[in-house]
């Protein structure tokens, strides 16, 4: 693949939780207006207004010329670390041929990644209040008990927590009737590939209203629909909507088995998740146009359980589902397994490698092997790792004292606890 080209600026638009326009979830910035300051946003702009902005035209021309774009740094980094990124060259020749000299592209995007605000029922370790209202509420509660701790969390934003703004911010731009109607009509009439995220779509009623709107209009049959869900809720009407789609896929955000998933995605209920998986499995058996895939956020808190998770996926799906390996969590930094003590990383790498023969899916084996290779590399100095490990302990111990009905990281990962204790006190 060319070192810079990505086809997303030619066929996709991303609407963030706040309503800002972007190209994809890995971009570092929003699509900026010509003044270089204001961003395209659903509150004041139509969904198609940014498509041939100066920002996007410049991005297309840079990628065509083989130049790197600053907004694509995360994918470049993933590839440098030996992982698969989201970049794709599919259709590259036609996209380039039909691009005008100024970088504009006449065909409107047919793929839409749509975030219906930040309403979510979970507070995940690697997430932020930008994507979950529950995280903001939890941080406010932590601050009431320990104001100095909350100040420290904000100061170390990006390292211990993805602090993204006002903690009690709720993004609900899509509740405006005019905006909602415009989005619904646009999706129904123009979008053939829809990727719905949140927040958590299953707790946002407007998401189900959109599906019902397209169902009523008879346009669901034209759409490939991808739904990201933490699998804690379902809507019985999905048995009516899903079979009508051209295709559907549930991307199950599950990061561990049982107590481990509850810890990372607090306070998820494992039994509810299993019921949701069973629900979608039953739908897929009757309507053979879809299924479930699993997309763990691979990080320090679950890297040791990666083979077990892949084996479990095979068991609950009868070998019909896969595991996505796009997400090696880099932020907040204390979630990155690269910060772990070297001896522990090597121990985990050896354990994973020894258990690869338990897995039947070759693609999953390749994905785990890339992380095994990553565990055997070092990206931080020893001094920096010791500092980050101390922050990991401080943040998680404090959060564990606040949370109820869940095991602590020390109970779930005793080998890591011992390794960090030895490493920090050397």
Image (tube, rainbow, N blue to C red):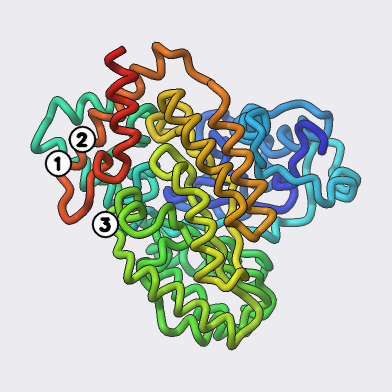
Marks 1,2: beta carbons within 8 A? yes
The residue at which mark 3 appears reads as 267
**Residue at x 27% of width, y 24% of height:** 421
Give the spatial CA distance, label 1 vs label 2.
6 Å
| Residue at the (47%, 33%) spot, across then down | 347
Residue under pointer 1: 401
Q: Is residue 176 above or below residue 283?
A: above
Does residue 250 appear to the left or right of 246 in the view shown? left
Q: Which residue is mark 2?
A: 397
Image quadrant holding the C terminus, namely: top left
Q: Nearer the viewer, residue 31 or 129?
A: 129
Sequence-wise first label, 1 or 3: 3
Disc 2 crowd, CA 10 A, few/some/many (<14, 14-19, 20+)? some
- Vertical arrangement, residue 354 with respect to residue 80, above or below: below
Neighbours of disc 3 within 10 Å: few (<14), some (14-19), many (20+): some
Residue visible at 68% across and 77% down?
Answer: 246
What is the C-alpha distance between the residues marked 3 and 2?
A: 16 Å
Asked whether disc 3 touches disc 2, contact meaning CB atoms under 8 Å apart, the reply is no
The span from disc 1 to disc 3 (Cα, nearest Å) is 14 Å
Q: Secondary structure at mark 3?
A: loop
């Amino acid at each position: 693949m060319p070192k810079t080209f990505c086809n997303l600026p030619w066929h996709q638009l991303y609407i963030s939780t706040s309503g800002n326009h972007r190209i994809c979830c890995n971009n570092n910035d929003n699509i900026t207006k010509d003044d270089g300051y204001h961003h395209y946003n659903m509150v004041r702009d139509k969904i198609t207004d940014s498509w041939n902005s100066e920002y996007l035209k410049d991005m297309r021309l840079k990628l065509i010329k083989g130049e790197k774009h600053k907004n694509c740094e995360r994918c470049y980094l993933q590839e440098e670390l030996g992982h698969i990124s989201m970049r794709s060259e599919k259709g590259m020749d036609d996209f380039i041929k039909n691009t005008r000299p100024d970088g504009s592209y006449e065909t409107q995007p047919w793929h839409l990644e749509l975030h219906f605000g930040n309403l979510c029922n979970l507070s995940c370790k690697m997430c932020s209040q930008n994507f979950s209202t529950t995280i903001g509420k939890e941080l406010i509660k932590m601050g009431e008990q320990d104001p100095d701790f909350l100040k420290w969390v904000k100061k170390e934003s990006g390292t211990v927590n993805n602090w993204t703004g006002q903690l009690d911010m709720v993004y609900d731009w899509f509740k405006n009737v005019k905006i909602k109607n415009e989005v619904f009509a646009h999706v129904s009439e123009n979008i053939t590939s829809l990727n719905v995220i949140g927040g958590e779509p299953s707790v946002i009623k407007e998401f189900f209203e959109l599906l019902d709107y397209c169902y009523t209009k008879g346009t669901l049959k034209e759409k490939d629909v991808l739904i990201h869900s933490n699998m804690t809720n379902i809507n019985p009407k999905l048995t009516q909507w899903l079979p009508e789609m051209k295709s559907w896929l549930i991307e199950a955000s599950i990061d561990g088995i049982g107590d481990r998933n509850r810890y990372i995605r607090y306070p998820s209920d494992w039994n509810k998740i299993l019921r949701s998986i069973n629900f979608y499995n039953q739908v897929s058996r009757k309507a053979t146009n879809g299924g479930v895939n699993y997309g763990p956020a691979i990080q320090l808190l679950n890297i040791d359980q990666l083979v077990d998770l892949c084996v479990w996926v095979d068991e609950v799906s009868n070998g019909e589902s896969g595991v996505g390996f796009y997400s090696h969590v880099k932020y907040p930094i204390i979630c990155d397994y690269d910060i772990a003590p070297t001896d522990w990383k090597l121990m985990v790498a050896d354990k994973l490698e020894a258990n690869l023969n338990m897995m039947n899916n070759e693609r999953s084996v390749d994905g785990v092997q890339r992380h095994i290779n990553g565990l055997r590399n070092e990206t931080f100095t020893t001094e920096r790792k010791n500092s980050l490990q101390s922050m990991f302990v401080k943040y998680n111990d404090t959060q564990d004292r606040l949370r109820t009905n869940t095991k602590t990281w020390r109970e779930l990962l005793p080998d890591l606890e011992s390794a960090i204790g030895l490493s920090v006190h050397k």
